[in-house]
Image (tube, grey):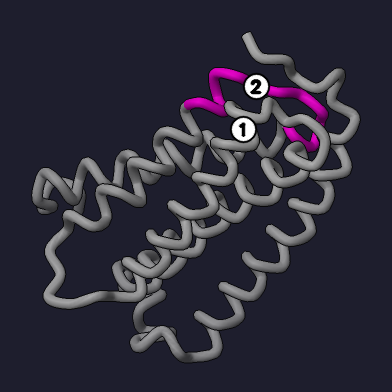
Amino acid sequence: MFTEMPPLTLAHVIISLIAIASGFVVLTGLINAKMLEGWTAIFLATTVLTSVSGFFLPAAHLMPSHVVGIISLIVLAAAIVARYLYHLRSGWRGTYVVTAMIAFYLNVFVLVAQLFAKVPSLKALAPTQTEAPFVIAQLVVMTLFVVLTVVANRGFRGFGPVLSPR
């Protein structure tokens, strides 16, 4: 499957999978009140690259994936500003958690959509992605992310002193 992809598409998929994997690590850190600096940098960088590289994939017109990419870049900008410019001071801590988790959710949202588009057994269940199995899967993912974001925000409040600029 991967060997049949054009190089840019393959790079986009690999970067997206790294973003998703590192997102799980960052989420776990937030829930456990740990700022995982390296993982955070990898997550934010690869998630930005995922959104940006998506605009270079072949498309004849503006697609829903482009809209998701635009939204992702907006929330990522807020997450990066909260983390690296305001160093999680005061309300920026919650802003960081919420916006980083929205960006993570959007990556997983697209992953689920791609799975339903590319995996034959899932495509058979929801060929137009308007059928109940697709909608239910996306609602489960969204609900899980809402709950995990609330838990992460509560857990990360317990994260030591606010980071100071270096």
Residue in the image at 39% along x and 61% along y:
70
Quadrant assignment, res 40: top right
Q: Secondary structure at mark 2?
A: loop
As drawn, the label of residue 17 is none
Residue 114: give x, y in percent of width and height: 36, 65
- Amino acid type, callout 2: Leu
Is 35 within the magenta? yes
In the image, is residue 34 part of the stretch drawn in magenta? yes
Amino acid residing under circle 1 = Val
Residue 100, placed above or below residue 30: below
* Earlier sequence position, callout 2 versus callout 1: 1
Identify the residue under disc 2: 36
Front residue of 152/14: it is 152
Q: Which residue is mark 1?
A: 25
User: What residue do we see at 57% from left, 56% from top?
Assistant: 105
Horizontal side, residue 122 vs residue 44: left or right: left
In this image, 127 relative to 79: left or right? left
Residue at image point 62% right, 8% down = 166
Q: Identify which residue, 113 or 3, lies in the foreground.
A: 113
Q: Secondary structure at mark 1?
A: helix
Q: Position of residue 57 (x, y in %)?
A: 17, 58
Q: Quadrant of residue 62?
A: bottom left
Q: Residue at x 76, y 37 (%)?
A: 93
Left or right: 41 in relation to 7: right
- Residue 38 is situated, as x and y percent measured from the top left of the image, at 54, 18
Labels 2 and 1 touching (C-beta < 8 A): yes
Which of 109 and 47 lies nearest the eye of the viewer?
Answer: 47
Residue 121 x/y as whole percent: 37, 75
Q: Residues within 10 Å of mark 2 (few under 14, many from 20)?
A: some
Span colored in magenta: 30-41
Q: Is residue 68 left or right of residue 134?
A: left
